């Protein structure tokens, strides 16, 4: 039986998704994961690095990824085989409310004397309900940075002691009483929490199962790595759990915490030392440091002379000066921005305080400078957004393509789904933003995830759109945008037909459910059709979202590691 100090488990959003007739792929269209949200949070890497550097043995077990890649895989076998002082399960995104709790329950049933720990944004928000309603969860690590707390928890468990006095922990003592320790102040710098990305190579060699260690199921075919540059946000987008007011409410964070330019580059170099995969820099480099600070980061990256594709995101349009600096990093530079809507009043109501003129200036400049690609992201389910406005995004994208001119531009649209984030302005004060929140406690969200169609999972409606309106507007937006991209030669006829078929099936299932529950025969039929379309469509979308060099061609490891890891990759089925 493998022995760890901390074993980190990532669950699918719905634990038994393979046995359920569910159609929810539209909810994961713009993230590098499938509809079960198989990508584990960045915190798994920071925790693994932090504890490993202190002599602790940490394992990552991505059950969701393995369940996608191997239809015959039994996650209970992994849970049984892993022996650890502490078992950690992430409940970061609320979409994992079902899977995370079920994995925690299974861990406790197989290892009754162990300590089962939850952590993440959603776990922090719902900590009391978790401990009151789920006796198999022993503790919750609270906050956006829990490395010190988890280290102390592991030490206490190793010594057979309780968790009293550990800041930033809620727990159940030996008498069954729920106890909340004093909060831990959020850090103001992220430099102590750098990730050593080589740790994934070590775990792959140890487990000899890449599907269990990989950040997500698509990692083998479309690998991407990330460097977190900032925590916290000065903006207050109304549905976002990472917004300024949500961060203060949930974590007590009253400002951003930055990773220094030197630490950002070191982490990027650690990725580049082992692979040629794309590096995504999470967070607008201007947050907390302004344009001059962002330019300093870019200059240091330029001196590092990385040959990896690089990807940067912007929370508001970038100046030509900053774009020119980024373009100087090389040919494979990708940039992205999320206007959310083509309608300025909708965008501003959501919290993106810029107009189309600024956006179009950035689009034009990015085309003139010849970036490898500019990506734009739009959303349905926003304040002041009508079905007509949501469905009209394709016409605006068509116009932006003309403005962009040279280089490559792409655009994506998806519903705000499945949830308005707890702690966000719209969740806490829905009437002020034109929202109605349909359920508020963790259990209601957990049950909603079991619904067969994503429309029934949504925890909100707006003054402008009820849930059926959001479904129809989202499908119209998706199909209209696909039609524009096909006509512009951005996608082929084959992908367009997959999207068209997926939209038709989505409408068929949604319409049928209006008349009542599915029969077992209908469930079986829809499940088979949905599974095939989901895999085909989401693999295609992932290849559209990110550069497509497979992992086997990205690695640069010295012998004999390169041969061993290549053999492990070869034994893992890609999607």
Image (tube, rainbow, N blue to C red):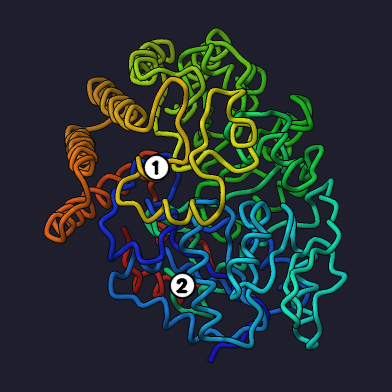
Q: Is residue 544 left or right of residue 245?
A: left
Question: Where residue 550 sits: x, y (%)?
Answer: 38, 55
Which label number is shown at residue 27?
Answer: 1
Going from N to C along the chain, the mark reached first, 2 or 1, is 1
Residue annotated with mark 2: 565
| In the rendered image, the vertical position of residue 494 relative to residue 519, given as above or below | above
- Cα separation, mark 2 vs mark 1, equals 33 Å
Q: For numbered disc 1, what is the local secondary structure?
A: helix
Q: For numbered disc 2, what is the local secondary structure?
A: helix
Question: Where residue 291 sits: x, y (%)?
Answer: 74, 24
Q: Residue at x 72, y 43 (%)?
A: 231
Disc 2 to disc 1: CB gap under 8 Å: no
Q: Residues within 10 Å of mark 2 (few under 14, many from 20)?
A: many
Q: Residue at x 48, y 85 (%)?
A: 80
Label count reads 2
Q: Residue at x 31, y 58 (%)?
A: 575
Which label number is shown at residue 415?
Answer: none
Q: Is residue 67 left or right of residue 416?
A: left
Question: Where residue 307 sits: x, y (%)?
Answer: 55, 45
Of 164 and 552, nearer the camera is 164
User: Which is in the foreground here, disc 2 or disc 1?
Assistant: 1
| In the rendered image, the vertical position of residue 487 relative to residue 563, given as above or below | above
Tell me the quarter of the picture where residue 2 sits.
bottom right
């Amino acid at each position: 039986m493998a022995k760890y100090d901390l074993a980190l488990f990532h669950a699918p959003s719905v634990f038994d998704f393979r046995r359920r007739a569910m159609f929810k792929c539209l909810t994961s269209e713009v993230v590098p994961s499938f509809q079960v949200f198989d990508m584990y949070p960045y915190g798994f890497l920071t925790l693994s690095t932090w504890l490993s550097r202190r002599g602790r043995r940490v394992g990552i077990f991505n059950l969701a990824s393995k369940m996608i890649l191997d239809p015959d895989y039994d996650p209970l076998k992994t849970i049984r085989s892993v022996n650890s002082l502490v078992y950690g399960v992430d409940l970061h995104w609320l979409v994992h409310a079902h899977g995370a709790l079920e994995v925690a329950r299974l861990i406790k049933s197989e290892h009754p004397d162990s300590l089962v720990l939850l952590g993440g944004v959603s776990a922090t928000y719902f900590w009391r309900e978790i401990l009151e309603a789920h006796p198999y969860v022993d503790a919750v690590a609270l906050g956006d940075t829990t490395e010190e707390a988890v280290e102390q928890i592991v030490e206490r468990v190793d010594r057979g002691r309780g968790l009293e006095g550990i800041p930033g922990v809620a727990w159940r003592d030996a008498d069954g009483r729920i106890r909340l320790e004093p909060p831990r102040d959020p850090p103001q710098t992220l430099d102590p929490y750098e990730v050593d990305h080589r740790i994934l190579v070590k775990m792959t060699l140890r487990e000899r199962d890449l599907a269990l260690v990989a950040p997500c199921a698509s990692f083998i075919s479309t690998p991407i790595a990330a460097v977190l540059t900032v925590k916290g946000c000065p903006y207050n987008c109304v549905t976002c759990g990472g917004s300024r007011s949500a961060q203060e409410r949930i974590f007590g964070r009253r400002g951003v915490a930055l990773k220094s330019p030197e630490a950002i580059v070191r982490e990027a170099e650690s990725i580049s030392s082992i692979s040629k995969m794309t590096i995504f820099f999470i967070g607008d480099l201007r947050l907390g440091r302004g344009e001059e600070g962002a330019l300093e980061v870019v200059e240091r990256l330029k001196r590092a002379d990385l040959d990896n594709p690089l990807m940067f995101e912007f929370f508001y349009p970038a100046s030509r000066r900053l774009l020119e600096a980024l373009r100087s990093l090389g040919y494979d530079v990708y940039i992205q921005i999320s206007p959310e809507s083509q309608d300025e009043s909708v965008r501003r109501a959501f919290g993106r305080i810029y107009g189309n003129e600024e956006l179009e200036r950035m689009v034009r400049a990015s085309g003139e400078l010849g970036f490898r690609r500019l990506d734009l992201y739009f959303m349905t389910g926003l304040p002041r957004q009508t079905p007509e406005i949501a469905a009209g995004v394709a016409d605006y994208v068509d116009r932006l393509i003309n403005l962009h001119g040279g280089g490559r531009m792409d655009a994506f649209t998806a519903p705000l789904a499945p949830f308005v984030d707890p702690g966000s302005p719209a969740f806490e004060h829905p009437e002020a933003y034109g929202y109605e929140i349909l359920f508020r406690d963790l259990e209601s969200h957990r049950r909603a995830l079991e619904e067969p169609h994503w429309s029934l999972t949504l925890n909100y409606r707006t003054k402008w759109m009820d849930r059926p309106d959001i479904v129809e507007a989202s499908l119209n937006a998706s199909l209209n945008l696909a039609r524009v991209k096909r006509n512009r030669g951005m996608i082929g006829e084959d992908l367009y037909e997959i999207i068209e078929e997926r939209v038709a099936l989505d409408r068929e299932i949604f319409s049928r459910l209006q008349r009542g529950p599915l029969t077992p025969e209908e469930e079986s039929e829809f499940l088979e059709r949905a599974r095939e379309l989901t895999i085909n469509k989401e693999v295609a979308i992932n290849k559209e979202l990110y550069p497509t060099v497979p992992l086997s061609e990205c690695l640069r490891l010295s012998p004999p590691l390169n041969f061993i890891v290549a053999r492990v990759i070869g034994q893992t089925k890609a999607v």
